[in-house]
Image (cartoon, rainbow, N blue to C red):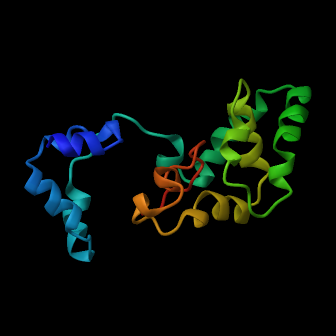
Amino acid sequence: MAQIARDEHHENWRSLYRLPPARIAALRATPLTGAHAHWLTTLPKADLHRHLGGCLTTTDQRQVARAIWTNLDDENRRLRTRDVRELLSKQEWPWDWPQQLQGPHRAQNTAALLLHASSAQLEHNLWDVTEPRVALKGSPHGFAAYERPGELRRFRA
């Protein structure tokens, strides 16, 4: 148990590590299949932390973005569009694109990106570039391969 706690770097998983080590090892070694679908869908879900991109469809995220956008004056709209212009000009965004949204205008920059990017750009950069979502420890980007900052990713069932 101490070794798991020492080796694991994801603090939000601490409750899971209260299970007996043999059970944790068994869970890690069990690949999920269609046979697990009923169990997964009936499993109680804790909603302690949620990103908008994880619970809203792209359409719904764009609706939130529109609400933010309509509350900006023309000058702020111009500035926020300028802030994301480079991303909008490319089909594939650099890996660190979410950091480009950071700062005091993150919500407005995110709104500009959601409203002005094409559906194809959003689908590709928020979802496709991090497929498949398995073996994250083997990915050069680690957990970041799953959780794209800004969490603009479309929810897929």
Front position in the image: 71 or 41: 41
Q: Residue at x 56, y 49 (%)?
A: 148
- Left or right? Give the position of 82 relative to 13: right
- Left or right? Give the position of 50 relative to 109: left
Q: Residue at x 41, y 58 (%)?
A: 137
Q: Where is the N terminus found, in terms of image quarters?
A: top left
Q: In the rendered image of this protein, does residue 102 appear above or below residue 8? A: above
Q: In the rendered image of this protein, does residue 137 appear above or below residue 69? A: below
| Total residue callouts | 0
Where residue 32 sits, quadrant-wise, is bottom left
Whole-percent x and y of residue 121? 73, 61
- Left or right? Give the position of 52 relative to 23: right
Q: In the rendered image of this protein, does residue 138 appear above or below residue 8? A: below
Q: Where is the C terminus found, in terms of image quarters?
A: bottom left
- Judged from this view, the residue extending furthest toward the bottom is 34
Q: Residue at x 71, y 38 (%)?
A: 101
Whole-percent x and y of residue 80? 83, 35
Q: Residue at x 69, y 33 (%)?
A: 102
Front position in the image: 121 or 26: 26
Where residue 67 sits, quadrant-wise, is top right
Whole-percent x and y of residue 84? 81, 44
Q: In the rendered image of this protein, does residue 29 appear above or below residue 23? A: below
